């Protein structure tokens, strides 16, 4: 796990060229650190999602079936909780891993960094979701998910997973802020992504692709002056408490 984190950070540092200091594209600085045009477009580097009937899709189907068997367990209940994406929830979910109570009130700089980092990373998969136009598991198998209130019959945006890119981005940011707890933080972020396969909202390949996209977006954000400034403020805030 340490090796994975160090590789991701190294990608960001190696990419730190002067040209990145020049912003291109329109950025809503209240919501994002970078524009979609500045981020790696996931549709241009991710592999195609597995075709129905392929060996890779059989693996997706196997993980789906395994997830169904967990739905009535405590792990299944946690997976339902992980359907939430608010900053409040994300901070609460990572609190045990960091051995402190993370709230927006106690750590406003950390909360803002997580919120904007997640929103920025999410931009990198927007085109991919439309381009691949993939059915979700509950649609393909014709079975209800664990979060029926979130189901939509015409929502063909399974690949990559939007929840997972938020959770893995959060894990990368928090692990960078608190390296003393990096393994526990990354394990939490990983488990949150796997929750999407348990509730039946995403295939394993959706989740895996989202982690790759999140890592690419994080590497790009990590060399942006605005992000780095926000990161330093969040780091000071975390250290003071």
Image: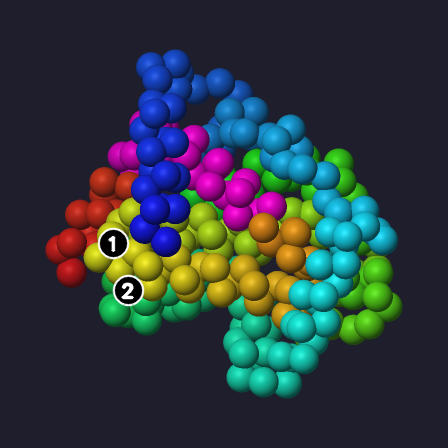
> How far apart, in angstroms, are the residues tagged by discs 1 and 2?
8 Å
Q: Nearer the viewer, residue 41 or 8?
A: 8
The residue that disc 1 covers is 178
- The rendered magenta stretch, by its main secondary structure, is classed as helix
What quarter of the picture does the N terminus occupy? bottom left
Label 1: few (<14), some (14–19) or many (≥20) C-alpha neighbours in 10 Å: some
How far across and down, in percent of the image, does residue 208 sit? 58, 50
Is residue 214 located in the magenta-colored stretch of the structure?
Answer: yes
The residue that disc 2 covers is 98
Q: Nearer the viewer, residue 76 or 59?
A: 59
Residue at 47%, 52% in the rendered image: 168
How far across and down, in percent of the image, does residue 21 sit? 35, 19
- Colour setting: rainbow
How far across and down, in percent of the image, does residue 63 sit? 67, 65
> Element type at marker 1?
loop
Q: Looking at the image, can residue 149 be seen?
A: no
Q: State the extent of the magenta-drawn residues as a range.
A: 209-230
Q: Nearer the viewer, residue 76 or 36?
A: 76
What quarter of the picture does the C terminus occupy? bottom left
């Amino acid at each position: 796990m340490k090796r994975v984190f160090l590789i991701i950070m190294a990608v960001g540092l190696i990419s730190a060229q002067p040209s990145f200091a020049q912003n291109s594209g329109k950025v809503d600085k209240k919501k994002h650190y970078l524009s979609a045009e500045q981020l790696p477009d996931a549709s241009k580097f991710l592999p195609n999602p597995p075709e129905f009937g392929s060996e890779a899709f059989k693996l997706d189907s196997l993980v789906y079936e395994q997830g169904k068997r967990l739905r009535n367990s405590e792990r299944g209940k946690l997976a339902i909780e992980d359907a939430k994406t608010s900053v409040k929830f994300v901070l609460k979910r990572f609190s045990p891993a960091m051995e402190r109570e993370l709230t927006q009130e106690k750590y406003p700089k950390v909360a803002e960094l997580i919120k904007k980092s997640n929103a920025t990373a999410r931009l990198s998969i927007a085109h991919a979701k439309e381009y691949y136009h993939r059915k979700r598991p509950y649609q393909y198998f014709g079975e209800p998910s664990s979060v029926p209130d979130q189901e939509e019959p015409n929502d063909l945006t399974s690949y990559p997973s939007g929840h997972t890119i938020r959770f893995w981005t959060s894990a990368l940011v928090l692990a960078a802020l608190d390296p003393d707890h990096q393994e526990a933080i990354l394990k939490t972020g990983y488990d949150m992504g796997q929750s999407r396969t348990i509730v039946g909202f995403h295939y394993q390949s959706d989740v895996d692709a989202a982690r790759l996209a999140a890592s690419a977006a994080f590497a790009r954000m990590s060399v942006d002056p605005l992000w780095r400034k926000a990161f330093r403020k969040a780091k000071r805030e975390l250290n003071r408490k």
